[in-house]
Image: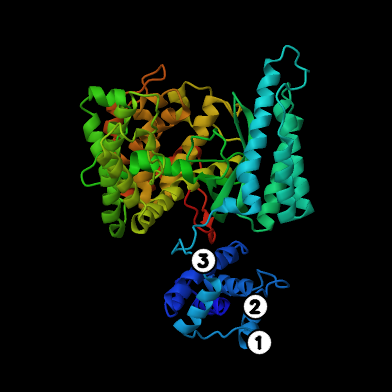
């Protein structure tokens, strides 16, 4: 009875090409039968979605879900839509379960309940998707960071040893490494397993090396690309990368692929990935996105993007709200240019929000403002103890603050939890996801431009930027030099502003924040922000001398330039950015075509 109900619901949904039809079909049966079947139907759909590259064809995905639930998928190519459709029709029309839904009687249910007696139902909804619950996902989320942390600790221990050739004092977690390799091989086969083994062993050799051996790096990155290629070819929603800093050396990290696409430009295809961090290592990139010649893909880091939105952008979407674009020390002294700037940035951000989303996002802004006030009160309470309370990095914060029970008014904790429960409501989460997706388009275009530039060979530093930096005019610059990094970032920022016409003002506002925040001075981003305002000012009005030498900036002049530029419409700003790019770099921006998106099951961490 239950299996028939599951299959009938999936068949009904497949015929209509809509996941929600499965729930509608289950509403026609006895409520307790529906209760039992809903999570199993949802799990079948999630599993089917993970089997194919293009999940936008919901009829195809739902036919796969039906065949999976019916145990009839063994010899079918998941990507062969015609074969899947024939198998679906044959199984439903032949000896398989009925496709037309029938009402299940309460008497039949009573017999089933008597057989199953003692079973208690605790969840009315399907369990949310979690990529860590699959064996491969579990290995990449838990075993991989355990192994990588052990290698990093061993590397630091070796660095402290008097004898550089001495074996590391701390043991390496080889068991976790073997579990990762086993999980990859079990899921992807021998080719994937061999690539993963090579990656981890080559990473270990590079991390423990006491010399700057580029050959070890080449081996490590080659194995990384083979491993990611095996994951991609098998349509697995995971991606690995190598990050690092001066303290920890290289680290292998894992991601969940939330969305992916292929970008076509000048005959070249560039992968575009929207990623969520999967592993638990306490090292991450602060950037909203990143790429490199070796990565070979443009990456948007959704966790960092949500942090940026929650801390700065979303709170500015409330009625008449300001966007806190300057550092706290400057805000405390409140020069006369600060308030007009922050008011204008807030107005610009709100103006580019679609009308249909404004009410929901304004409500979110109010809830975040209330949560910030609660957080300040809770921090004052925690200051009397050793407790440390961090600002939330996500829309919905999971902290319950049980440790503060009895030390603060009960109502404060109730208000905190109630606020987060409200922010978790589907309508508000949906509005936030749509906003984050729009922001991701800006970041993605930025990273795509980096990939285009990598493939373009030597690019001179524009004269305007050289003048600001006091840089020499040659092209033989080290990729990590300030001049080269500023050149690359200026190209990418102008491309993002010029290419996202509906969000050009938002893209501009995000790009120029570093010139107003003294904590960013000295970074390439502050120089680029000043260069952007100068370049766009020459195209649109509002140009001024912003750089003040010695790594400092004339922020009052920068604010005046921003206000003048931001008085223009988004399309005008986008067009001005395109002209500025052509003037500075000597050619027009290339045409970029983004292919169909591969959408993965939503993961709410």
Q: Is residue 357 left or right of residue 246?
A: left
Label at residue 95: 1
Q: Position of residue 407 (x, y in %)?
A: 30, 31
Q: Residue furthest bottom?
A: 94
Residue shown at 52% from the left, 86% from the top: 100
Q: Is residue 167 left or right of residue 557?
A: right
Quarter in which the N terminus is drawn: bottom right
Residue shown at 62% from the left, 48% from the top: 138
In the figure, residue 122 lies in which quadrant? bottom left
Label at residue 159: none
Q: Nearer the viewer, residue 529 or 92?
A: 92
Q: Given this view, does label 3 or label 2 mark the residue nearer the observer?
A: 3
Chain-order first, disc 3 or disc 2: 2
Above or below, 161 against 604 in this view is: above
Rate crowding at label 3 as few (under 14), some (14 to 19) or many (20 or more) other CA atoms within 10 Å. few
Above or below, 271 against 197 in this view is: below
Q: Which residue is mark 2?
A: 82
Q: Is residue 571 visible?
A: no
Residue shown at 58% from the left, 50% from the top: 132
Give the CA distance from mark 1 to mark 3.
31 Å
Rate crowding at label 1 as few (under 14), some (14 to 19) or many (20 or more) other CA atoms within 10 Å. few
Label at residue 119: 3
Chain-order first, disc 1 or disc 2: 2
Q: Is residue 68 visible?
A: yes
In the figure, residue 553 lies in which quadrant? top left
Give the CA distance from mark 1 to mark 2.
20 Å
Q: Position of residue 28 (x, y in %)?
A: 43, 80
Q: Secondary structure at mark 1?
A: loop
User: What colour scheme has been applied to the protein in the rendered image?
Assistant: rainbow
């Amino acid at each position: 009875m239950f299996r028939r109900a599951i299959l009938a619901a999936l068949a009904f949904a497949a015929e209509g090409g809509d996941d929600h039809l499965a729930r509608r079909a289950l509403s026609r049966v006895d409520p307790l039968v529906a209760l039992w079947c809903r999570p199993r139907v949802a799990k079948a759909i999630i599993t089917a979605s993970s089997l194919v590259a293009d999940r936008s064809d919901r009829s195809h995905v739902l036919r796969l879900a039906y065949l999976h639930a019916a145990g009839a998928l063994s010899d079918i190519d998941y990507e062969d839509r015609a074969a899947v459709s024939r198998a679906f029709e044959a199984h439903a029309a032949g000896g398989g379960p009925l496709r037309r839904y029938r009402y299940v009687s309460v008497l039949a249910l009573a017999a089933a309940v008597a057989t199953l007696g003692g079973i208690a139902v605790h969840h009315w909804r399907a369990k949310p998707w979690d990529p860590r619950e699959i064996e491969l996902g579990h290995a990449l989320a838990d075993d991989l960071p355990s192994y990588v942390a052990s290698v990093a600790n061993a590397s630091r221990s070796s660095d402290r040893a008097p004898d550089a050739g001495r074996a590391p004092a701390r043991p390496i977690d080889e068991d976790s490494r073997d579990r990762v390799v086993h999980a990859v091989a079990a899921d992807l086969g021998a080719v994937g397993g061999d690539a993963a083994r090579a990656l981890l062993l080559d990473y270990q050799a590079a991390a423990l090396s006491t010399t700057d051996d580029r050959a070890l790096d080449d081996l490590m990155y080659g194995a990384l690309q083979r491993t990611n290629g095996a994951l991609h070819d098998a349509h697995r929603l995971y991606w690995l990368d190598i990050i690092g800093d001066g303290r920890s050396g290289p680290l292998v990290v894992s991601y969940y692929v939330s969305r992916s696409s292929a970008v076509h430009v000048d005959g070249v295809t560039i992968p575009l990935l929207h990623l969520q961090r999967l592993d638990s290592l306490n090292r991450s990139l602060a950037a909203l996105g990143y790429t490199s010649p070796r990565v070979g893909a443009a990456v948007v880091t959704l966790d960092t993007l949500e942090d940026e939105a929650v801390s700065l952008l979303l709170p500015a979407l409330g009625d008449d709200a300001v966007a806190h674009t300057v550092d706290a020390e400057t805000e405390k002294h409140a020069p006369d240019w600060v308030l007009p700037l922050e008011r204008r940035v807030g107005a610009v951000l709100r103006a580019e929000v679609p009308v249909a989303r404004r009410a929901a996002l304004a409500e979110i802004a109010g809830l975040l403002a209330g949560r910030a006030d609660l957080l300040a009160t809770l921090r004052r309470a925690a200051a009397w103890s050793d407790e440390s309370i961090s600002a939330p990095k996500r829309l919905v914060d999971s902290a319950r603050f049980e440790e503060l029970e009895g030390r603060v008014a009960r109502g404060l904790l109730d208000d905190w939890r109630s606020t987060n429960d409200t922010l978790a409501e589907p309508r508000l989460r949906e509005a936030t996801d749509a906003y984050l997706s729009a922001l991701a388009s800006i970041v993605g275009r930025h990273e795509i431009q980096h990939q285009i530039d990598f493939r373009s060979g030597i690019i001179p530093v524009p004269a305007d930027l050289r003048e600001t930096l006091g840089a020499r005019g040659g092209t033989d610059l080290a990729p990590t030099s300030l001049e080269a990094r500023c050149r690359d970032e200026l190209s990418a920022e102008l491309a993002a502003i010029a290419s996202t016409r509906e969000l050009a003002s938002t893209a501009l506002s995000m790009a120029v924040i570093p010139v107003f925040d003294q904590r960013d001075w000295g970074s390439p981003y502050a120089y680029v922000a000043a260069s952007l305002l100068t370049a766009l000012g020459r195209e649109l009005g509002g140009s001024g001398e912003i750089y003040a030498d010695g790594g400092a900036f004339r922020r009052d002049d920068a604010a005046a330039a921003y206000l003048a530029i931001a008085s223009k419409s988004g399309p005008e700003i986008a067009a001005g950015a395109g002209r500025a790019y052509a003037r500075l770099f000597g050619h027009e921006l290339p045409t970029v075509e983004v292919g169909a998106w591969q959408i993965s099951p939503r993961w709410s961490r």
